[in-house]
Amino acid sequence: MISVRRRCSARITAGLVLMLALAACGSSDDKVSGDTSTTTKGKPSASGPIRTVTATDYEYAGITDPIVAGTRLVLHNEAPAELHEMVVVRRPAGETRTAAEIAKLPEAELDAILGGGPPALVMLARPGEDGKVAVGEAVLPPGEYIAFCAIPQGVDPDEYFDPKNQTADGPPNVEGGPPHFTLGMAGDLTVE
């Protein structure tokens, strides 16, 4: 069984490769160019409110209060050195544990809960920057979600994004510690 971290990282890696390719081509009408007001097809996103989720070492601020449907999410990384992401997956029906409780589960249980499908949203943010969408859309449909960061502790952001470290079937081939969610970087998110 492929772990949640590897499965999410494979999708993130595909998004990163797309981000790098688009950045190299100088595209200005796609969501990964840094303009968070557009979607992948260059169409304006919802003109509704914006909710900034702030990433620090190792927690999120700004996701505990319910989010109004149509709100565009922005991930801002206030950490001085760590790369952070926000992987958002729909909470499975009947799952009542908090994201913090789920993050502490053994890998097999974690896979059973979070590994059922693609993430609804993945945003990556370098230290001191707003994130870029790698997977999904920054406006989530109503529902209950779990957000977590699977970036390994201590990863050099430049090494993580370097194309030579990308792999086809998993996370970039870089040195690092445990995933940030094991250090407490997980949260519950509700869109109403």
Image: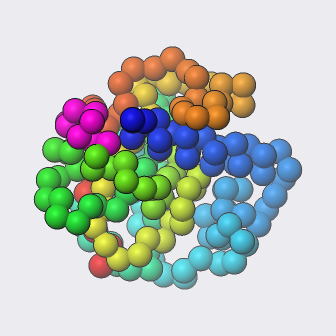
Front in this rendered view, residue 55 or 120: 120
Q: Residue at x 78, y 46 (%)?
A: 21
Q: From what the image shows, is residue 181 above or below residue 159?
A: below
The answer to whether residue 37 is visible is yes
> Looking at the magenta stretch, what is its main secondary structure?
helix
Q: Residue at x 41, y 75 (%)?
A: 141
x and y, in percent, of residue 15 in the image: 63, 48
Q: Is residue 99 left or right of residue 31?
A: left
Q: From what the image shows, is residue 150 above or below residue 122?
A: above
x and y, in percent, of residue 158 in the image: 63, 28
Q: Which residues are magenta?
A: 103-111
Front in this rendered view, residue 156 or 103: 103
Q: Is residue 62 highlighted in magenta?
A: no
Q: Residue at x 51, y 52 (%)?
A: 123
Q: Residue at x 72, y 71 (%)?
A: 41
Front in this rendered view, residue 69 or 88: 88
x and y, in percent, of residue 166 in the image: 65, 30
Query: What's the coloring here?
Result: rainbow
Q: Quadrant of residue 1?
A: top left
Q: Is residue 110 highlighted in magenta?
A: yes
The answer to whether residue 158 is visible is no
Q: Quadrant of residue 136?
A: bottom right
